[in-house]
Image (tube, coloured by chain):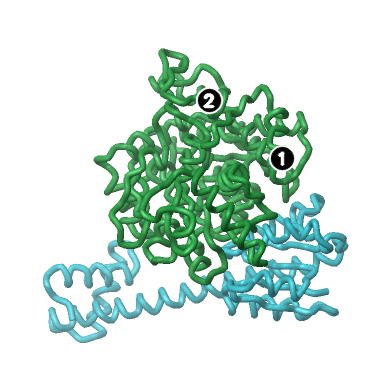
Amino acid sequence: MRIAIVDESATRATIIEEGLAQVPDCDIFVLTERHGLLSRIEEIAPDIVLIDLGNPSRDVLEEYFAVSRVLARPIAMFVDESDDDAIAASIDAGVSAYVVDGLAAHRIRPLLDLAIKRFHAFARLQSDLAEAKGKLAERETIDKAKRILMQGKGVSEPEAYAELRRKAMSSNRRIAEIAEAVVTAHELMGGGE
Amino acid sequence: MTEQLTIGFLPLVDACLPILAHEHGFAEEEGLALTFQRDVSWATVLDRLLYGHTDAAHLIAPLAIATTLGRGRPAQPLAAPFVLGLNGNAITLTPELAAKVAEPGRLGDPAAIGAALAEEARARKAAGKRLHLGVVHRYSSHNYMLRYWLAASGIRPDDDVEIVTVAPPFVADAMERGEIDGACVGEPWNSAAVARGVGVIVLATAQIWRRGVEKVLAFRAPVLETRRPAAEALIRALRKAGAHFVDPANWETNAAILARPEYVGADPALILSAISDQLVLVQGAEPVPYPDFMFQHREAANFPWVSQAEWLYTQLVRWDRLAYSPEDAAAAARVFRPDVYRSALAGTGDLLPGASSKVEGSLARPTAVTAQQGAITLANNTFFDGRSFDPDDIEGYIDSFG
């Protein structure tokens, strides 16, 4: 079975490719370039095409499939109506699948399930990354607030931190929010670095 | 109590009304909280609508008909109770081709440009290098307008020229790379090609059909029933947004809002030129005014005339090479829902057409038509070739194209 993965995010494409590599008898082709996409697809002659929902080439690809329907290899969106749940799950995960006509559902389902899992895994990775970045930014803000307090009030670093924490507890907010307020106030008062 | 509605859209200027209804508080006044889902392909806008990620969507009108008839996907009935706008697209050619077939710097006569293009198309075909023209989707008004114009000019689409799908934001790229010789696309993507010097605007689609239906607000038909009060509230908010949108005093503010990255994400100056009907046709030239380039509000522009849906059906039959089917024609007609539009606006003082269908393209001059209270004056709505479409004879109209 020949599978084409169309994804402008090379990282995500790799994650999906790794997932599908477990499936026996599969040739996987990753297409990350928008330019020349249709001629690549034509060369590959895939049985299944997976493309992410955010890909701007989807309409171009669907048009190609609509035209190819009159050619030798009709291909359509994975739309066996009995599999509507599977399509809904794939749309939720952010991937759409196009399948060559006549490919048995029992061969498609495990593949699609794997692809969906991999899409979810990638989304988790991204949100972990965003969270990590957010934490790092918070750390920096807290450090900045500590420096402002240390300079402004002549206190030590542990004292500055203790003050931020006291204020956070008494106002039922997070330390990072208090630090943010301190930094903003300092900037407004003409401070800054 | 506020009700939540999520609306899908593609970054185009004519997604303006829902966006402005939200930004200026018209939706809130109607008890709605709108959220938006921005996507970059119509396939994804449609999938999100069909699988419930969105409640309603900014959609190319022919795609609503095609989806209902099961073209390309299993049939799912859609319902369009509101037309988001008429026209607003243009035909842009590469500077070389424009110089051969048009007078760069002005919007010429569609018949004359069509005749010149026919000659060029035949020459290119004979040379084994057919002209390639881009449209945004197979089931788009762009495709139907372009094909209507080409065919009436003696050019056989799919035979004399090749029509290919190009995503709107990449039209300029495709022209620069020589992948296409021209395109029919919405704003700001014509102007973007002009600004880069890779395209020249030669026609506005309003010159092909003066009042051509463009985008609709689409729901899944069952969703429109279950969310009916919210849908009607949205229609009222969209009418208010339309009044705001067409007021010249608001153009700059609205262009700045629409330009934001979460909406269209394009140069506010280009958006301003589209909404003020001022188009720069050639790189570096002064803007040329073209009244009603976009048509979002006046003359009950948002009223979903059943005859518009039926006209789209005739073009779907024509270009998908289908046989006329009375059942399909009826299903297509049912997509447009003037009953919902009327019920939403009854009692608001808005003018509501008395009829639900009209002969499209029959008005060569401003004409008063009956409204439920008083009259509405409809301006010239002609097709450039002088044909008109009588919805009482859909089959005859299809046959007339041969």
The residue positioned 69% from the left and 69% from the top of the image is A117
Instruction: Sort mark 1 into few (<14), some (14-19) or many (20+) by Cα contacts within 10 Å.
Output: some
Quarter in which the C terminus of chain B is drawn: top right
Q: Is residue B51 visible?
A: no
Point out residue B378 in the picture as x, y percentages from the top left corner: 43, 24
Q: Say which residue label 2 marks.
A: B362
Q: Say which residue label 1 marks.
A: B317
Chain B, which colour?
A: green
Query: Is residue B10 toward the left or the right of residue B258 in the image?
Result: right
Point out residue B53 in the picture as x, y percentages from the top left corner: 59, 51
Which chain is cyan in the picture? A
Q: Earlier in the sequence, mark 2 or mark 1?
A: 1
Under tag 1, what secondary structure?
A: helix
Q: Chain of mark 1?
A: B
Quarter in which the N terminus of chain B is drawn: top left
Point out residue B155 in the picture as x, y percentages from the top left corner: 63, 49
Residue B105, quarter of picture:
bottom left
Q: CA distance from mark 2 to mark 1?
A: 22 Å
Residue B190, quarter of picture:
bottom left
B296 or B142: nearer the eye?
Answer: B142
The residue positioned 64% from the left and 71% from the top of the image is A37
Q: What amino acid is labelled 1 in the image? A: Val
